[in-house]
Image: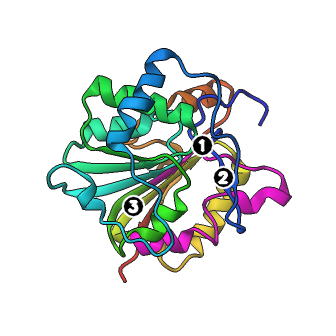
Amino acid sequence: MTDSKTDRPNDESPQTDTGNRLFGRRKGRPLRKRRTSLIEDLLPRLEIPVPKPGDHLDPAGLFDGPKREVWLEIGFGMGHHLAWQAGHHPNVGIVGAEPFLNGIAGLLGMVEDGDLRNVRVLPDDARPLLDALPDASIGRAFVLFADPWPKKRHADRRFIGPENLPRLARVLKDGAELRLASDDMGLVRWMLEHTVKHPDFEWTARRPSDWRIRPDDWPATRYEEKAIAAGRKPVFMRFVRRPR
């Protein structure tokens, strides 16, 4: 894509391939004073250390007090969607994984401004976190407006695919939603192809409006608004984790 990707949730986030390498930038423009302060002071209180191979993580234990469920957003970009979900669901613990420092700082600003106490952050690749989570421990997962990696030779860097769908299927509860979105039709077709044929996921769409219209509990992001203004039409996909 040729437009600016500053507001795309996953565009500036490093992506992965089958060799467990991390692609992309961890840092963008220099942080302003307030955001630097948030990284230094607030992030340590919310940060989840990157799990090592063989580690086990109890997601409910990450939060102060009991939570109805724990949700996971992979590649939260500048954090607008995650912060909205946290503010509207205070009884849900929300974990965000994002390696891009500027995006982390953006989320931290919203956490502080909104006094959001149900957010935790993994400032790195989501795959070690997925591997450390127990089976059926996540009530909802989001992968929204990921980098489309349009070149054919880079297709295996896309997060939704044969490498990571089994990870997501393992950690999602029966009946949990996996929400995907993109304005890039190549990526949409790729995600549909791989997720529809995966035996653990069922696409919930029954009519065109189910993927053309964003649900009320799915807030717009600045990137989405810019994509629409540029003439691109986002696609919103919801999959359900089939019973084990």
Going from the N terminus, do you reach mark 2 or mark 1 first? 1
Where 20 sits versus 66, above or below? below
Q: Which residue is mark 2?
A: 15
In the rendering, at what x and y percent does residue 173 appear?
A: 33, 70
The numbered dot on residue 10 is: 1
Q: Quadrant of the N terminus?
A: top right
Give the residues drawn in magenta, as a range. Answer: 142-171
Q: For the point 33% across and 31% down, which residue is it?
A: 111
Q: Any mark on residue 177, and which?
A: 3
Residue 216 appears anywhere in the view? no
Where on the picture, by quarter, is residue 227?
A: top right
Q: Categorize mark 3 by other alpha carbons within 10 Å: few (<14), some (14-19), many (20+).
A: many
Amino acid at pointer 1: Asn
Q: Examine the rendering and report whether any part of residue 230 can be seen.
A: yes
Image side of residue 1 versus residue 140, left or right: right
| Quadrant of image for the C terminus | bottom left
**How busy is the neighbourhood of tag 2: few (under 14 within 10 Å), some, or many (20 plus)?**
many
Element marked by disc 3? strand
**What residue is at 67 percent from the left and 46 percent from the top?**
147
